Amino acid sequence: MRSAVAVLGLVALTALPMLAQEAIVLPNGVVVNDPALAQGLEAIPSTDEIAAEVEAENAAARPQVDAATLADMQANLREVSADLQALRAQLLASGAQGFVAAGGDSAIDRMNAMEAQIAAVTEKTEQLSNRIKQVVAEGTNRIGDIEFRLCELDANCDLGALMTADLGGQGAVAPAPGGGPVPPPPSDVSAETLPPMAEPETVATPPTEEEAREFAEIRGLVAAQDWAPAKAKLDHLVTAHAGGPLTAEALYLQGIARQGDGQLNQAAQSYLLAFSAAPDGPRAPASLLALSQAMTGLGAPGDACPYLDELTRRFPASPEAAEAAPLAETAACAELAAADEGGAN
């Protein structure tokens, strides 16, 4: 039998080749002397490989959605509403023959029904947009809180340099270099020559918070006769909230701002659109009267006659109808109507 010393000697001789093997250095700098352990550790994928695999799986599982965003949907609704208002304006400008060709009073009723549906869809998209903004804000706050906590755990992290981007956003867009447009010279139009700017009537469907805020700001600019920013904000309001409860009011203010800035032709278009947006609304008589006065100011008093006739026919008890009578007399509307009837006969 072998002695215990001999057995220990054999074990030592057997272990010598293993101890004589070179140590293995892993990619992370850790030195491992055990080949089996090193081989097992090398088989574990790196964090970059794991992240790439997870990203690939997420991309494969991500649903294919339509490229059209909510903003695109709102823009399309605004375009449809603007086209409908333009069609209504053309119908009103065509006079009695246009009404007959379009199907009589039912044409206006159909347009009103379509505008009501567009307004309902627009309101739903705005509600959805507000909900998305709320979700983005809450998600951004939570991500920012996580980033702050992770930064506290890292000795090299600068808490002051943390800038959490909005969830799903692409970052802020830098403003374009250079100054803005040169403001026009002050207008010589006085408040007496402009249509009155009455308080807006209470509407059945309340406006959104954003629409009401923008409208209140615009009223202040128009009251101060600050025409350039008022026109810019009105252009945005009537486009971004087309078909809303304040559309007719905004178009009427747009006419005042354009007229105050010396753009009488564009002002007449705004007054016509204001009436067509709500032909039975509280601002309709004032829009028709302002439109008639604008046509007279453009040197075409005869063109004001159809709108003066519409005003006295639709709103005979309104204060604007009383003002329409002397305008119709000055424009010789009765003589023009008689001449048209004689030509038709």
Image (cartoon, rainbow, N blue to C red):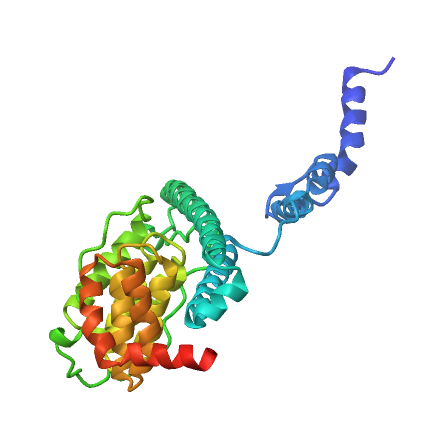
Asked whether 33 or 47 is in front, the reply is 47
Asked whether 245 or 230 is in front, the reply is 245
As drawn, 213 above or below 83: above
How far across and how far down the image is residue 232, in percent? 31, 71
Q: In this view, does 162 lie to the left or right of 315?
A: right
Q: Is residue 35 left or right of residue 345?
A: right
How far across and how far down the image is residue 109, in percent? 46, 53
The residue at 60%/44% (across/down) is 30
How far across and how far down the image is residue 28, in percent? 60, 47
Asked whether 279 or 130 is in front, the reply is 279
Determine which quarter of the picture holds residue 337.
bottom left
Residue furthest right in the image:
1
As drawn, 12 above or below 107: above
Whether residue 70 is visible, yes or no, is yes
How far across and how far down the image is residue 226, in percent? 19, 73
Whether residue 229 is visible, yes or no, is no
Q: Is residue 10 left or right of residue 75?
A: right
Q: How many discs mark residues in the rendered view? A: 0
Q: In this view, does 112 lie to the left or right of 313?
A: right
